Structures are given as structure tokens and as C-alpha cells.
Image (cartoon, rainbow, N blue to C red):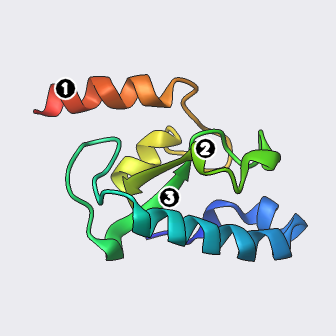
Amino acid sequence: MTTLLSRNFRYAILHPVRTSRMARIMRRWADAQPQVCEYCGKLVRRSKRQVHHCLPLWAVPEAAENPENFSLVHGGHCHQAAHLGNYAEGYIENWGEVCDVIRRKWR
């Protein structure tokens, strides 16, 4: 499983203090959410969950700490799918709509 630092290396290097604060905000946000993956709709164990930034940090760094930009997903396949397999450059613009389609398909 990848870490916040490895997934957002450029952001973390440029903003070390913000990265630490962002990690705390994301952890608190994730603890308060239903433990269900937004992508596949299945339960997420705490040890397997990750917080996805719908708008990636490299594209919209000012949205890094905005909970409206967060989505709870399984680490691994579901989070990789959210980035089209490339954490450094890939993302899905209509993330919420894609999740709705995937969940309906997997029911």
C-alpha cells in the first residue's frame, strides 16, 4: 500500500508543514465518515482505507485540506482507479458520477 507522502511526493516536498496538517485533517475526516468505499461501495477496514483527493494536489493545491475534495476509498485498486493508475498525473474529473456507475454495476 502506498503512503500519503509517496502518492503526493511533489506536494509534500514543497509544503511539508501543510502536508502534516493535511494528514491530520484527512484522518479526522475519515474517522467521521461511514466506512464505505465511494468507488466500489463495499466496507473499508480502517487499515485499508485511504482518502482520495477528487481534485488532485498537483492540479489544485489549494483544495488539499478541503473536506469537500475528499473521498474515502480502499487503498490499492480503488484508489489507483481514481487516478487511472498514475498518482502523479491521472485523475477522473467526474469522480462522483463514475463512482455511481461503478457501484450500480457491481451490485
Horizontal and vertical percent for residue 90?
Answer: 61, 38
User: Would residue 74 appear left or right of 84 to someone viewing this image?
Assistant: left
Name of the residue lying farthest toward the right: 14
Of the two numbered discs 1 and 2 on the same chain, state the one appearing first in sequence.
Answer: 2
**In this figure, which residue is indicated by the disc labeled 3?**
51
Determine whether the residue tagged by mark 2 lies in a helix, strand or loop: helix
Horizontal and vertical percent for residue 7?
Answer: 62, 61
Determine whether the residue tagged by mark 1 lies in a helix, strand or loop: helix
Horizontal and vertical percent for residue 24?
Answer: 62, 75
Residue at image x 51%, y 63%? Answer: 29
Q: Split into 4 quadrants, where in the image is the N terminus? A: bottom left
Q: CA distance from mark 1 to mark 2?
A: 22 Å
Amino acid type assigned to the residue bearing label 2 in the image: Asn
Q: CA distance from mark 3 to mark 1?
A: 22 Å
**In this figure, which residue is indicated by the disc labeled 1?**
104
Q: Is residue 58 above or below residue 51?
A: above
Amino acid type assigned to the residue bearing label 3 in the image: Val
Mark drawn on residue 69? 2
Q: CA distance from mark 3 to mark 2?
A: 10 Å
Viewer-nearest of discs 3 and 2: 2
Determine whether the residue tagged by mark 3 lies in a helix, strand or loop: strand
Q: Are marks 3 and 2 in contact (CB under 8 Å)?
A: no
Query: 93 or 76, which is in the foreground?
Result: 93
Q: Are marks 3 and 1 in contact (CB under 8 Å)?
A: no
- Packing grade of label 3 (10 A; few <14, some 14-19, many >=20) is many
Residue at image x 52%, y 71%? Answer: 27
